Amino acid sequence: MHYKTISIVCVVLICILINPVFSLAQTPDSETQDTFHWSVVPYAWLTGLNGTIGARGYNTSISAPFVDLANYLKFGAMIHLEGNYADRIGVFTDFNYSLLGDEASGKRISLDGKTSLLLTDIAAFYRLGSFPLSQANKASVSFDVLAGVRIWSLSLLLDGDRARGGRDIFENRSWVDPLIGARAEFHFAKDWLLNMRGGVGGFSISSALTWDAMATIGYTFWEHGTLLLGYRAVGVNHTEGSGQSAFTFDVTLSGPILGLAFTF
């Protein structure tokens, strides 16, 4: 009940205060109505990791900020894909894959170099409307509500300390969390925009709670190209099983984002 209450409160706050991201460089006009638009955004998320990871009685606290990225991130692949119809309804997916190295270590357990995390958001959205902010520079803001799922797939190797026999524990877990949220896009100058997105999920269906918040600022240097710079954070509190079958993934992933959005 505690996490459910927190989740409901977060939803209300996000919808009121954030209304949030990644709707990409699209300015509605009469020529774009009743048509499909597509966005492809390869990007780099310099992901820091902080929290608790454990399996089969082994637990460790991890603190690996994005500034130490070179020490523990061996490989990463991220892309955002989005399609919308008539600037009103659409779907998007965020795909993030990270391969972590063994220098992301806790006191008695370290993450082996083959540890991998696959995080995928899939959601549909509905645009509530677009509203002018200034007639002088054609500034505007649009608001979307969204609903979907967050898919987690985690493979990790925990290296036990000598006091526990030095045993290596391998775990491969996958789960799906429901997700709701909102986003907003501000066009505050001819070539500049601000995107925000936030959401909550889990609701004790799979994870007790998952949440995300992201903000990016973009500069449109070409009709079909926008450079994006921002910050994203994703949190999850997922536990399952007990004793030798126990598994814990209670972490926050956060760090800067640099991307290039292509729209057509």
Image (tube, rainbow, N blue to C red):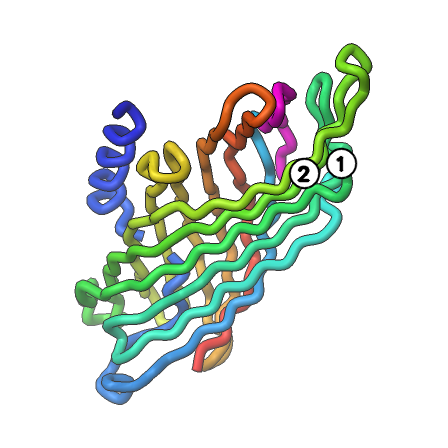
**Which SS does the magenta portion mostly show?**
strand
**SS state under label 2:** strand
Q: Residue at x 49, y 64 (%)?
A: 80
Assess whether mark 1 and mark 2 are in contact (beta carbons under 8 angstroms).
Answer: yes
Around disc 1, counting alpha carbons within 10 Å, would you say few (fewer than 14), some (14 to 19), or many (20 or more)?
many
Residue position marked by numbered label 2 in the rendering = 156
Q: Quadrant of the N terminus?
A: top left
User: x and y percent of residue 212 in the render?
Assistant: 41, 44
In this rendering, is residue 33 above or below 161? below
Q: Residue at x 25, y 57 (%)?
A: 145
Given the current orientation, which residue lies at the most extreme bottom position?
31
Magenta segment: 53-66
In this rendering, is residue 253 above or below 63? below
Q: Residue at x 34, y 34 (%)?
A: 204
**Numbered label attached to residue 112:** 1
Magenta-drawn stretch contains 36: no
